[in-house]
């Protein structure tokens, strides 16, 4: 086996310790008809192998055979397959669907080995930590297994323990994958479609995180802080004093699996309301906090007797910074307004860019996509087919979709699937439309937004105040022959945009001031009646009108910026 040296053209031998595992990988892949995936990378014949993969899609290298090969290869490759199933922008739909079925349930290891890991990591005997430790596991996966236990103070907990040797096997497999990715990159293989090194590093980050239970504990703690005081979602408390890289102890939560519709109805839980609540929790996680549970399959959510949700397993979370969240809002606004250029511009802000820099073909394709859904309101469009169309568009245009965005789209589709299990009439886009509308109103009525708008308006007013003087000076100089006019059509268009933008800022300042004055008048009505004054009186109408026209001005400003 060889690997590239720092992305250059030279290669050198891989560590001897990896050769046996590499041969095992080749044998298993070859047995399932997909040996070219590794062998082609080493020999430099990957393009021909890829063509062979496409030609034999119905034969030996079918999606089912690839899935079986990954299952046989074990922990690392099962996880890689699960991650790849979220990247429908890279794989044909049949392969993505097959990889979704990858099972991560394997026979448990003997409890004596699990106890040994606990004692090695905690430096104490199991009996000195727990009043009771159940030898029969609740669940067993390729990386770890879960046992019930009772703390010495009587608290009921679950203990997640990494199986012995797993981290070392993952390290070897990741080293092999990194070697192959460097070889592919050094030979220019797959460069047209993706960056193999970056893709493997994405796998590695996720896998190494799943092998580090302290990272999972931090994810759980962050989600718990975000939803503190919210009865709609409960996150189990992690016992940090008993948590290490290989041992995770957290409180045990009881409830009914979210996909057990019959059990939920028998418990008197409104499944229609539960579907909506689940979607709202995800939307709040994404847009308010930028941190969301990225593995929302039914086994990871329980429903309490009062209808509240409890989340489990925090090994995979998604993160979006403020810029990405704002860009997503712009995408949603552009889709609602059916403006393809604005959709493409917002996607570019998210890191999705057409190859070659020519965005016109992509704008046309987006227009066709929007036309396909034009006869239905946004709240009636099923999300999963729409996401499927988006992934298909990504593949056709060979767009590089950022991993965090691909994970988000997959998470949204999974959440809609759970919602439809609870309520066949559930439409995720309806919940998204309502949530984003409320979010937009909250943003434009927040003091921070008003101050930012007033600051921007002040800049616009100052620029506008200087404009007549500058024009007068320019015209005087032109009249005296002191300057020559050599402006292109693009220059005049840009000047027109800048003047229009300044005028928009002035209008925005007036509207924001009206909003602030309305709020102050409502507050002046006094005490507990403030909310009633807003609901019943003219301040609500004035403030609502200001919000509506303010949004219209923002849209106009966005157009002028383009």
Image (cartoon, rainbow, N blue to C red):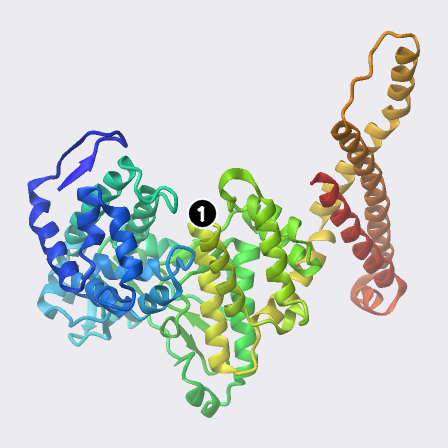
The residue shown at (20%, 59%) is 34
Residue 281 position within the rendered picture, expressed as x and y whole percent measured from the top left: 53, 66
Foreground pick, 2 / 380: 2
The residue shown at (27%, 63%) is 56
The quarter of the rendered structure image containing the C terminus is: top right
In this rendering, position of residue 523 left or right of residue 201: right
- Location of residue 52 with respect to 415 vertically, above or below: above
The quarter of the rendered structure image containing the N terminus is: top left
Q: Quadrant of residue 28?
A: bottom left
Foreground pick, 551 / 55: 55
Residue 349 position within the rendered picture, expressed as x and y whole percent measured from the top left: 57, 44
The residue that label 1 is drawn on is 400
The residue shown at (17%, 76%) is 136
SS class of the residue under badge 1?
A: loop
Using the rendered image of the protein, determine whether residue 525 is visible from the camera's viewpoint: no
In this rendering, position of residue 538 left or right of residue 173: right
């Amino acid at each position: 086996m060889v690997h590239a040296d720092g992305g250059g053209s030279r290669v050198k031998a891989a560590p001897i310790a990896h050769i046996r595992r590499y041969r095992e990988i080749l044998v298993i892949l070859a047995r399932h008809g997909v040996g070219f995936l590794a062998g082609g990378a080493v020999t430099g014949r990957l393009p021909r192998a890829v063509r062979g993969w496409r030609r034999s899609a119905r034969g030996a290298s079918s999606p089912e055979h690839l899935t079986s090969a990954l299952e046989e290869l074990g922990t690392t490759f099962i996880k890689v397959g699960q991650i790849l199933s979220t990247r429908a922008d890279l794989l044909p739909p049949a392969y993505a669907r097959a990889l979704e079925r990858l099972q991560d349930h394997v026979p448990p290891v003997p409890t004596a080995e699990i106890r040994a890991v606990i004692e090695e990591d905690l430096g104490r005997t199991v009996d000195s930590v727990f009043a009771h430790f159940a030898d029969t596991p609740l669940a067993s996966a390729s990386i770890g297994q879960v046992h019930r236990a009772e703390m010495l103070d009587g608290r009921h907990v679950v203990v997640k323990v990494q199986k012995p040797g797993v981290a070392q096997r993952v390290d070897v497999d990741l080293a092999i994958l990194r070697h192959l990715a460097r070889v592919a990159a050094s030979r220019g293989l797959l460069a047209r479609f993706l960056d193999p090194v970056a893709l493997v590093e994405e796998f590695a980050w996720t896998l190494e995180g799943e092998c580090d239970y302290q990272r999972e504990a931090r994810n759980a703690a962050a989600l718990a802080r975000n939803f503190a005081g919210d009865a709609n979602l409960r996150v189990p408390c992690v016992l940090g004093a008993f948590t290490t890289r290989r041992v995770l102890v957290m409180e045990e939560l009881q409830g009914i699996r979210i996909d057990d519709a019959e059990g939920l109805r028998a418990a008197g839980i409104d499944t229609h309301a539960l579907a909506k609540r689940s979607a709202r929790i995800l939307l709040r996680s994404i847009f308010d906090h930028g941190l969301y549970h990225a593995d929302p399959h039914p086994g990871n959510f329980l429903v309490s007797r009062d209808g509240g949700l409890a989340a489990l397993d925090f090994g995979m979370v998604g993160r979006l910074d403020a810029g990405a969240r704002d860009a997503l809002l712009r995408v949603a606004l552009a889709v609602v307004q059916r403006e393809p250029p604005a959709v493409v511009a917002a996607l570019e802000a998210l890191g999705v860019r057409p190859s070659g820099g020519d965005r016109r073909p992509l704008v046309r394709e987006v227009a066709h996509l929007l036309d396909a859904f034009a006869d239905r309101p946004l709240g009636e469009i099923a999300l999963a087919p729409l996401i499927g169309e988006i992934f298909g568009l990504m593949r056709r245009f060979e767009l590089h979709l950022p991993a965090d965005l691909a994970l988000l789209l997959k998470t949204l589709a999974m959440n809609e699937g759970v919602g439809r299990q609870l309520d066949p009439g559930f439409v995720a886009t309806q919940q998204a439309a309502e949530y984003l509308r409320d979010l937009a109103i909250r943003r434009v009525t927040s003091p921070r937004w008003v101050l930012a708008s007033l600051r921007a308006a002040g800049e616009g007013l100052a620029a506008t105040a200087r404009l007549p003087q500058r024009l007068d000076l320019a015209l005087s100089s032109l009249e005296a022959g002191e300057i020559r006019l050599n402006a292109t059509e693009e220059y005049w268009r840009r000047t027109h945009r800048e003047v229009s933008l300044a005028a928009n800022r002035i209008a925005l300042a007036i509207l924001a001031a009206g909003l602030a004055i309305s709020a102050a008048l409502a507050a002046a009505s006094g005490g507990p009646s403030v909310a009633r004054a807003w609901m019943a009186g003219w301040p609500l109408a004035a403030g609502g009108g200001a919000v509506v026209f303010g949004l219209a001005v923002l849209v106009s400003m966005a157009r002028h910026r383009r």
